[in-house]
Amino acid sequence: MEIENNKEEVPFSYYENLFQKMDAADATARLKDIQWDGKEFYVNLLGRAFAISHPKYALRATDGGQLPSLPTQTFLLRYLLEGRSVTSQGTWLTFREMPWGELYIKPYTGRVLTRAAFTFGTRIQAFRTACEKMGAIPLSHGDAGFQFDFIGGYRMQILVWEGDEEFPPNAQVLYSDNFSAGFAAEDRVVAGDILISTIKANM
């Protein structure tokens, strides 16, 4: 593949090569939520099912819909390569409260929280409609809030507050506590980005 967008295509190509060498049995042992039929892995991400062929990578949406972006595909590859199933204890954490969260909080705030606030806090009803369309569970927190099954046993909540003349719009994203052990900090940032992008695409 000729590299045109280094920021997205170089990491994707790197993990695609690792994926080709991956032991399928190892992936199914680590990840209890995936299925493997000898040719394809089946993974659910934000309510959509994707089939990923192995060892030669190819991705298809089982609903026949549009394929996710290259960064999302890279995330799925990293999940199959490095992810593991971890049981949640039922509590919720902010990004800052998880390991390495303090180190990454500035880029996370800009890439996830500020983006969510100004994308959704200025269009609360469109945000609600999109989340309901995605099958999310409504929450009583914030001016609008929803809970999503992200991937496997990992869940996320997004809360949005509408801006007014005195205060700008605001947003918070919460992660089920198993994200602390199940994902590196970089992947938690990407998870927030994927959640926002997917909701936005449904608005």
Image (cartoon, rainbow, N blue to C red):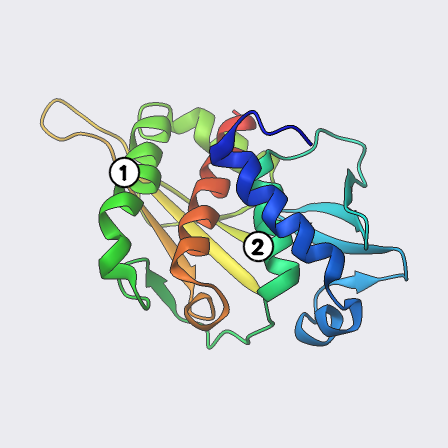
Residue 200 % position (x, y): 49, 29
Residue 140 % position (x, y): 37, 50
Residue 76 % position (x, y): 62, 51
Closer to the eye: label 2 or 1: 1
In the figure, residue 179 lies in which quadrant?
bottom left
Left or right: where 37 falls relative to 35: right
Residue located at (31% from left, 24% from top): 122
**Vertical side of 138 occupied by 126: above or below:** above
Task: Provide the secondary structure element on which disc 1 rests.
Answer: helix
Residue 73 % position (x, y): 62, 43
Residue located at (55% from left, 75% from top): 86
The amino acid marked with disc number 1 is Gly
Residue located at (81% from left, 55% from top): 55
**Vertical side of 90 occupied by 47: above or below:** above
Q: Which residue is mark 2?
A: 149
Residue situated in front as seen by the camera: 136 or 37:
37
Determine crowd level at label 1: few under 14, some 14-19, many 20+ residues with C-alpha closer than 10 A.
few
The amino acid marked with disc number 2 is Asp
Task: Provide the secondary structure element on which disc 2 rests.
Answer: strand
The image's mark for residue 29 is none
Q: The N terminus lies in which quarter of the figure? A: top right
**Vertical side of 9 occupied by 57: above or below:** below
The image's mark for residue 110 is 1
Determine crowd level at label 2: few under 14, some 14-19, many 20+ residues with C-alpha closer than 10 A.
some
